[in-house]
Image (tube, rainbow, N blue to C red):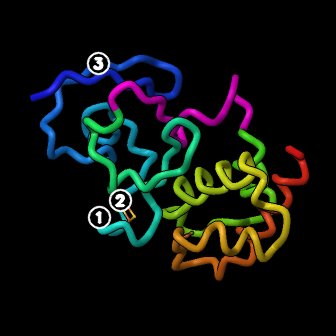
Amino acid sequence: MRSVAITVNGERRELQLEPRELLVYVLRERLALTGTNVGCDTSSCGACTVLLDGESVKSCTVLGVQADGCEITTIEGLAMNGALHPVQQAFHEQHALQCGYCTPGMVMAAVSLIESGEAGSEKAIREGLEGNLCRCTGYHNIVKAVAAAASVTA
Ligand code: FES
Ligand code: FES
């Protein structure tokens, strides 16, 4: 076991982790933050995307111990004072989800894309989200939502 300290959604969490534990399971099973989903466990789908020190990462590809000293933001950390984050609001308004399974990861990837200034065109958004799979929507409304959120936050 190793002692790690991770700041998750602004709160410092101290944990004893086995080196083999994946960050996605640390979030879901140790910290009860089940908004981050597991779709494949093999780094293909993006359902597990979170922000690690502001960068989007697939949390099934990161060991919990690698997050020691880092800041993690999950979907639970986006809304502020009961108000949806602009990307969440845009997904709602543009009907950018159906079953919702991909949505937390898709939203976190979109937040990172917008914050890094890489959501300037439909092509850029489609390329930026290519690591996040959705089996329901056909992506059209997701791209519309990200473009709408990018224009609001620009
Ligand atoms: S569960 Fe991590 S990429 Fe699919
Ligand atoms: S909304 Fe169902 S997988 Fe994307």
- Asked if ligand 1 lies within 8 A of label 1, the reply is yes
Q: Pointers 2 and 1 in contact (CB under 8 A)?
A: yes
CA gap, disc 2 and disc 3: 23 Å
Q: Residue at x 70, y 74 (%)?
A: 126
Instruction: Identify the magenta region.
Output: 68-84
Amino acid at pointer 2: Val
CA gap, disc 2 and disc 1: 6 Å
- Asked if ligand 1 lies within 8 A of label 2, the reply is yes
Classified by dominant secondary structure, the portion drawn in magenta counts as loop
Magenta stretch encompasses residue 69: yes
Q: Residue at x 46, y 18 (%)?
A: 11
Amino acid at pointer 3: Glu
- Tag on residue 136? none
Q: Residues within 10 Å of mark 3 (few under 14, many from 20)?
A: few
Residue 62 is situated, as x and y percent measured from the top left of the image, at 33, 49
Q: Residue at x 59, y 50 (%)?
A: 108
Q: Taking 49 as reference, is 115 left or right?
A: right
Q: Earlier in the sequence, mark 1 or mark 3?
A: 3
Amino acid at pointer 1: Asp
Nearer to us of marks 2 and 1 is: 1
Q: Which residue is mark 3?
A: 14
Residue 124 lies in quadrant: bottom right
Classify mark 3: helix, strand or loop: strand
Ligand 2 appears in which quadrant? bottom right
CA gap, disc 1 and disc 3: 25 Å
Q: Which residue is mark 2?
A: 38
Classify mark 2: helix, strand or loop: loop
Residue 45 is situated, as x and y percent measured from the top left of the image, at 44, 70
Q: Which residue is mark 1?
A: 41
Residue 123 is situated, as x and y percent measured from the top left of the image, at 78, 77
Q: Pointers 1 and 3 in contact (CB under 8 A)?
A: no
Q: Residue at x 45, y 46 (%)?
A: 35
